[in-house]
Image: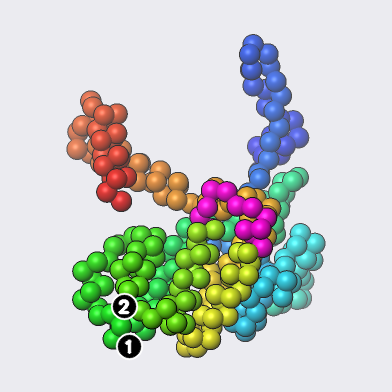
Amino acid sequence: MSELKILEQEGILIEVNGQKVNFKGTISLASGDNLSLHLLGGFKSQSSALRICMATSDEAQTKFLECSFALRTQETYTYYCSFLSGPLCDDASTTYGILRKSILNESKYFHVADGLVPDIMYDILEGCAPYIVKELVKYLISERIVTLQELNDDITAQMWCLCRLLSPMTGDKIPESDLRWQNFLRLLSIMDLLFAPKVSQDDIAYLSVLIEDHHSSFSQHYPSCNITPKIHYMVHYPTWISRCGPLSRFWCMRFERSKSYRAFSLAIFLEGSASYCAFTLAILFNTHSFAS
């Protein structure tokens, strides 16, 4: 944080076109999975507390518009943190979901209450989509609309591909009036907007309506399934898109890609191919990209 404060207050000199220019900077947004963002923010785990709003688990099961929840703010975060050093320390954790003050709040401009951007790779592709598709597939098999063998013959390991291809794979067998199927199609419409490289204000307003309709329908047609934190976070996506732009610009997919790149580099080194490292990496990485 000491280096960040220097960058914010004094800046650094960088030579541009033969002249030294002073640049100042700060943290704009923090991207990561929910576990890491909760740790960065000093919040309890997402299974027992939500970092964007103050929703209880019961409220998250029945309310699907952001305006129905009290959002966390810098002021309320500071107020709740004031309990950490007093007799109400347990309340800060159990009632308000805060375990510790975040060191990132020492920044002059950044605050974890409104700077921890949601990640659609973890929330959608590794959270909502598998959960919802699983329940839909269980229903389709139990109703004998499709068989497990038919799905296994056509299925792909990638969740995004599965969501996109499930409709052409099984859509001809499912009645258009099937309400669970309609719920899944709403999810696809939501994903189209979430992963879009560009969205308009009308798209954002429509996204809010789609999410409310989807969550209400999901809660009604899958009564034994809870609205998980990752599904709940979708309620806040329209606001985050309005603030930051398309969420695909901030997701962790590119970080996962870098991890794969480093893994390839290590494999090359261990296999003794260092003399042709650049060429080997290019071949392996491009092959991996096309294969995936």
User: Could you tell me residue 94's position as x and y percent?
Assistant: 66, 77
Q: Mark 2 or mark 1: which is in front?
A: 2
Q: Secondary structure at mark 2?
A: helix
Residue 90 visible in the shown view = no
Q: Is residue 199 magenta?
A: yes
User: Could you tell me residue 63's position as x and y percent?
Assistant: 65, 79
Front residue of this view, candidates 22 and 169: 169
For image coordinates 29% across by 34% down, the residue present is 282
For image coordinates 37% across by 68% down, the residue present is 167
Q: Which contiguous range is marked in magenta?
A: 194-205
Front residue of this view, candidates 76 and 91: 76
Mark 1: give few (<14), some (14-19) or many (20+) Cα within 10 Å.
Answer: few
- If the image is split into quadrants, where does the N terminus sit? top right
Give the quadrant of residue 204. bottom right
For image coordinates 63% across by 70% down, the residue present is 209
Q: Check the image and report above or below for 78 versus 280.
A: below
Q: Is residue 291 left or right of residue 63?
A: left
Which labelled disc corresponds to residue 143? 1
Q: Amino acid at mark 1?
A: Glu
Q: Is residue 94 magenta?
A: no
Which labelled disc corresponds to residue 268? none
Q: Is residue 247 left or right of residue 289?
A: right
Q: Disc 2 designates what residue?
A: 173
